[in-house]
Image (cartoon, rainbow, N blue to C red):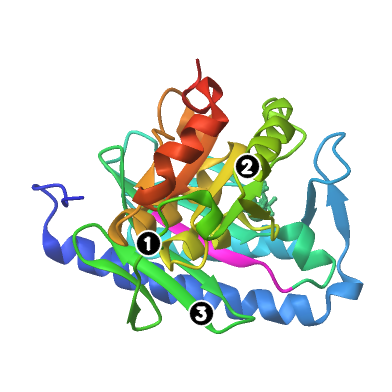
């Protein structure tokens, strides 16, 4: 993926450095909450008892938003907890303060901070910080993707039986496609994994730990940062941002090139909204 020609490299440098710093600092703040998770008050979003949120999610989003706005007041913002602002801006930050909140509140180490930047409607850079494993996944269009300092490359699998596929679903519309998909995957000799964080599973696709990741309906803050990493590591993404993808979400698939078409065929027309 090329960088937008009219964005000055220095403007990209500044935002890339800021995304990495803020993701790391927010993740450290998240760890302080995580260590005292037994005393956090947890609430549910709407009627869905599985869709949880804690004070940590809200306070981390405020922290991230304030840091980004202080350095780049002209940029727009989409966040899971605080909504969106200035969507007419060329540069729009798309962030999830804690991806994997259900894991976070239950003491499972699969959660992270995800910060992505979209420029002129295209994902440009991303930083995903996992403080439990001391891993910062990051990447920028045309500059590669890394975990800490190590370059990332997607898996070399050419068939689903050659590796693990991340999967996810929620109680939102689209969940009816989940079990038929799992059945087809098993029939082909594949195997699935769900760790509770779409952002981390996307980073693992970029890192070649998973051959791909499919979720029946995901939100942009779960995956925009990771999409940059997957592309920079040589992988493929579906047209996730089509239609109202930025605010409303869409079905989501990222995979290494050797299995992308096979997995897309197993999902069927629902992947691209037909
Ligand atoms: C969730 C996680 C989960 C995915 C859900 C997301 P949250 O985000 O990424 O893996 O299956 O679709 O909503 O609620 O932990 O930020
Ligand atoms: Ca999320
Ligand atoms: Ca979240």
| Numbered tag placed on residue 185 in the rendering | 2
The residue carrying mark 3 is 135
Dot 3: within a 10 Å radius of its alpha carbon, few (fewer than 14), some, or many (20 or more) residues? some
Disc 3, SS: strand
In three-dimensional space, the C-alpha distance between marks 1 and 2, rounded to whole angstroms, equals 18 Å
Q: Which residue is drawn at 22% across and 68% down?
A: 13
Q: Residue at x 59, y 43 (%)?
A: 188
Mainly helix, strand or loop, the magenta region?
strand
Give the label, 3 or 2, closer to the camera: 2
Q: Which of marks 3 and 2 is nearer the N terminus?
A: 3
In three-dimensional space, the C-alpha distance between marks 1 and 3, rounded to whole angstroms, equals 22 Å
| Numbered tag placed on residue 46 in the rendering | none
The residue carrying mark 1 is 156
Observer able to see residue 77 = no
In three-dimensional space, the C-alpha distance between marks 3 and 2, rounded to whole angstroms, equals 30 Å
Please state the extent of the stretch shown in magenta in the rendering: 109-116
Q: Quick check: is 110 in the magenta stretch?
A: yes
Q: Is residue 219 left or right of residue 196?
A: left
Q: 42 or 85: which is nearer to us?
A: 42
| Ligand 1 within 8 angstroms of badge 3 C-beta | no
Q: 209 or 189: which is nearer to us?
A: 189
Q: How many labels does the image show?
A: 3
Q: Quick check: is 114 in the magenta stretch?
A: yes
Observer able to see residue 55 = yes
Give the label, 1 or 3, closer to the camera: 1
Residue 212 locus on image (x, y percent): 50, 52
Residue 266 locus on image (x, y percent): 55, 32
Q: Quadrant of the rendered structure where residue 17 is? A: bottom left
Q: Quadrant of the rendered structure where residue 121 is? A: top left
Q: Which residue is drawn at 25% across and 39% down?
A: 120
């Amino acid at each position: 993926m090329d960088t937008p020609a009219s964005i000055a490299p220095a403007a990209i440098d500044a935002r890339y450095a800021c995304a990495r710093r803020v993701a790391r600092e927010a993740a450290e703040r998240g760890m302080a909450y995580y260590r005292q998770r037994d005393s956090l008050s947890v609430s549910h979003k709407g009627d869905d008892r599985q869709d949880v949120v804690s004070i940590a999610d809200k306070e981390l989003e405020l922290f991230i938003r304030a840091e980004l706005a202080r350095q780049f007041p002209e940029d727009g913002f989409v966040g899971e907890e605080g909504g969106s602002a200035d969507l007419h801006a060329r540069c729009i930050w798309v962030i999830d303060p804690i991806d994997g909140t259900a894991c976070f509140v239950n003491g499972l180490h699969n959660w992270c901070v995800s910060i992505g930047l979209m420029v002129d409607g295209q994902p440009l850079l991303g930083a995903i910080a996992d403080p439990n494993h001391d891993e910062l996944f990051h990447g920028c269009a045309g500059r590669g993707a890394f975990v800490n300092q190590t370059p990332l490359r997607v898996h070399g699998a050419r068939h689903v039986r050659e590796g693990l596929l991340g999967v996810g679903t929620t109680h939102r519309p689209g969940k009816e496609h989940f079990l038929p998909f799992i059945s087809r995957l098993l029939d082909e000799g594949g195997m699935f994994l769900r760790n509770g964080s779409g952002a981390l599973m996307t980073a693992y696709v970029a890192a070649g730990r998973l051959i791909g990741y499919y979720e029946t309906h995901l939100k942009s803050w779960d995956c925009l940062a990771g999409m940059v990493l997957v592309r920079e590591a040589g992988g493929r993404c579906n047209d996730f941002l089509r239609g109202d993808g930025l605010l409303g979400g869409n079905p989501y698939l990222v995979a290494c090139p050797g299995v992308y078409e096979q997995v897309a065929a197993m999902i069927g027309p629902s992947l691209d909204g037909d």
